Image: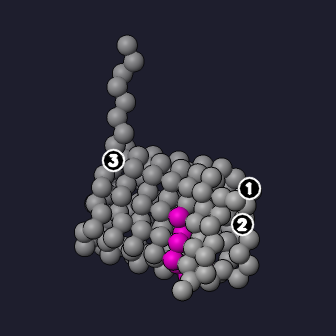
Amino acid sequence: MEPLRYRVILGLRRNPISDLKPLNRLTRLVELKLGENEITDLEALRSLTNLSKLSLSDNQINDLSPLRPLHQLTQLNLRRNDISDLNPLSTLTQSRELNLEDNRLMDVSALRSLTNLQKLDFAKNAIDQPVCPVKPESICHFQPPL
């Protein structure tokens, strides 16, 4: 008989959370929901290398560099933050879904290496040239800011 496998999930949406340091030892987490908080610093997430799903929507994040080592991420939601630099995401080659709606993006070319993407949302960004960085281009959703 095969042993049972558990998905370790933590949901902390809609809280006044700003300090993520208490999470840095939860290395078995595979899914983390931190939307609608007051997060600016992601450094504590650097050690959560088993994460496959991460939601950070509706925060005040602008530095994505702590996400570089999270190579197992397949779904990442960064909607409604303060992001302008996507270069740290170029290492997340397992990503299948990426939501970057309503940020400060002007250039999305850093995502060219994410060839496993199936859904990519750039709506409500001021992107200079709205060209999908990966194929097929139909996976990209562009919509100018209102």
Looking at marks 3 and 2 on the same chain, the residue that comes earlier in the sequence is marked by 3
Residue 86 appearing in the image:
no
Nearer to us: label 3 or label 1: 1
Please name the predominant secondary structure of the magenta segment in the image: loop
Q: Is residue 60 above or below residue 22?
A: below
List the single residue furthest toward the left.
Answer: 15
Q: Which residue is mark 2?
A: 132
Tag 2 near tag 1, CB within 8 Å = yes
Q: Residue at x 37, y 13 (%)?
A: 1
Whether residue 89 sits left or right of residue 2 in the image: it is: right
Whether residue 92 sits left or right of residue 81 in the image: it is: right
Q: Secondary structure at mark 1?
A: loop
Q: Residue at x 70, y 53 (%)?
A: 115
Say how the picture is coloured: one colour
Rounded to the nearest angstrom, the CA distance separating label 3 from label 2 is 32 Å
Which residue type carries mark 1? Pro
Crowding around mark 1 (Cα neighbors within 10 Å: few <14, some 14 to 19, many 20+) is few
Which residue type carries mark 3? Ile
Question: Is residue 104 within the magenta segment?
Answer: yes
Rounded to the nearest angstrom, the CA distance separating label 2 from label 1 is 8 Å
Q: Residue at x 32, y 75 (%)?
A: 38
Q: Position of residue 90 (x, y in %)?
A: 64, 61
Q: Residue at x 41, y 78 (%)?
A: 60
Rounded to the nearest angstrom, the CA distance separating label 3 from label 1 is 31 Å
Numbered circle sitting on residue 9: 3
Which residue type carries mark 2? Cys
Nearer to us: label 3 or label 2: 2
Q: In this picture, which residue range is highlighted in magenta?
A: 99-105
